[in-house]
Image (cartoon, rainbow, N blue to C red):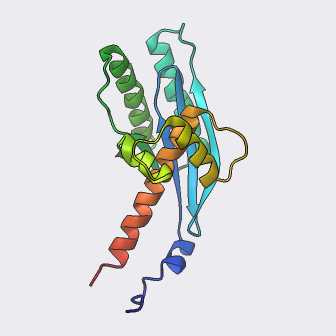
């Protein structure tokens, strides 16, 4: 059985380019990473962290995250944002602060009119490391390898790049299934 007309994956993917901003929210350090899928290959665009001293009050840290994400969104103009889903934390205060940082990221996305997709930690780890329980170090190493980066990527930025890679893999797979349904 051959490939149905219009379902040549290589030809289809070479026509499309998709840029995703991954965000790893945190109130002390929010990681971000921009990855593009071009001609069927992952391309690293940029990454970094938005830091805020722990000595600043929560409102000022959230404001700094918001302004930083607005700047990243304006500079790199992604077509989508990938964000880790809410998880259940043992410490209610940590969970609350993380939720506030996620809220700021969602607000920045909404104001920029950029679609947000959310993935579980296990889905993100599976997409980059092939194992949903991968360690932070394994994720960092695989992100560096997949994007052909030299040097160690900071953990928060690596997690953000991993979220972007996960979304690109998911959306690529979904487009393939939509364009080429099984018969």
**Relative vertical location of residue 172 with respect to residue 75 in this rendering, above or below:** below
Give the residue at x 56% y 37%. 137
**In the image, what residue occupies the spot 59% across and 31% down?**
49
| Residue 59, horizontal then vertical, whole percent | 44, 14
In the rendered image, residue 1, in percent from the top left (x then y), is placed at 37, 92
Residue at the image position 42 percent from the left and 39 percent from the top: 111
> Residue 157: horizontal and vertical position, in percent?
57, 36
How many dots with numbers?
A: 0
Seen as rendered, the residue at the extreme bottom is 1
When asked about the image quadrant of residue 169, the answer is bottom left
Using residue 20 as the reference point, say whether residue 131 is left or right of it: left
- The part of the image, by quadrant, that contains residue 7 is bottom left
Q: Looking at the image, which residue sits at the far right?
A: 150
Q: Measuring from the top left, give residue 103's x and y in whole percent.
A: 37, 29
Q: From the viewer's perspective, is residue 171 above or below residue 116?
A: below
Left or right: where 138 falls relative to 113: right
Q: Report whether residue 76 is seen.
A: no
User: From the image, which quarter does the C terminus lie in?
Assistant: bottom left
Against 47, residue 179 (above or below) is below
- Tell me, yes or no, if residue 183 can be seen here: yes
- Left or right, 108 with respect to 70, comes to left
State whether residue 170 is above or below residue 81: below
Residue under the point 41% across and 91% down: 2
């Amino acid at each position: 059985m051959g490939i149905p007309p219009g379902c040549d994956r290589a030809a289809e993917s070479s026509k499309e380019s998709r840029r995703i901003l991954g965000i790893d929210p945190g109130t002390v350090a929010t990681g971000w990473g921009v990855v593009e899928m071009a001609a069927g290959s992952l391309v690293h665009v940029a990454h970094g962290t938005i830091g805020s001293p722990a000595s600043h009050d929560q409102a000022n840290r959230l404001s700094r995250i918001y302004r930083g994400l607005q700047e990243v969104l304006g500079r790199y103009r992604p077509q989508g944002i990938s964000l880790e889903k809410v998880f259940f934390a043992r410490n209610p205060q940590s969970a609350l602060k993380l939720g506030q940082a996620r809220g700021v990221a969602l607000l920045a996305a909404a104001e920029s009119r950029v679609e947000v997709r959310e993935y579980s930690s296990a889905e993100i780890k599976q997409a980059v490391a092939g194992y949903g329980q991968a360690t932070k170090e394994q994720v960092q190493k695989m992100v560096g390898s997949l994007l052909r980066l030299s040097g160690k990527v900071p953990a928060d930025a690596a997690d953000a790049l991993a979220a972007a890679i996960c979304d690109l893999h998911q959306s690529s797979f979904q487009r393939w299934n939509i364009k080429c349904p099984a018969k």
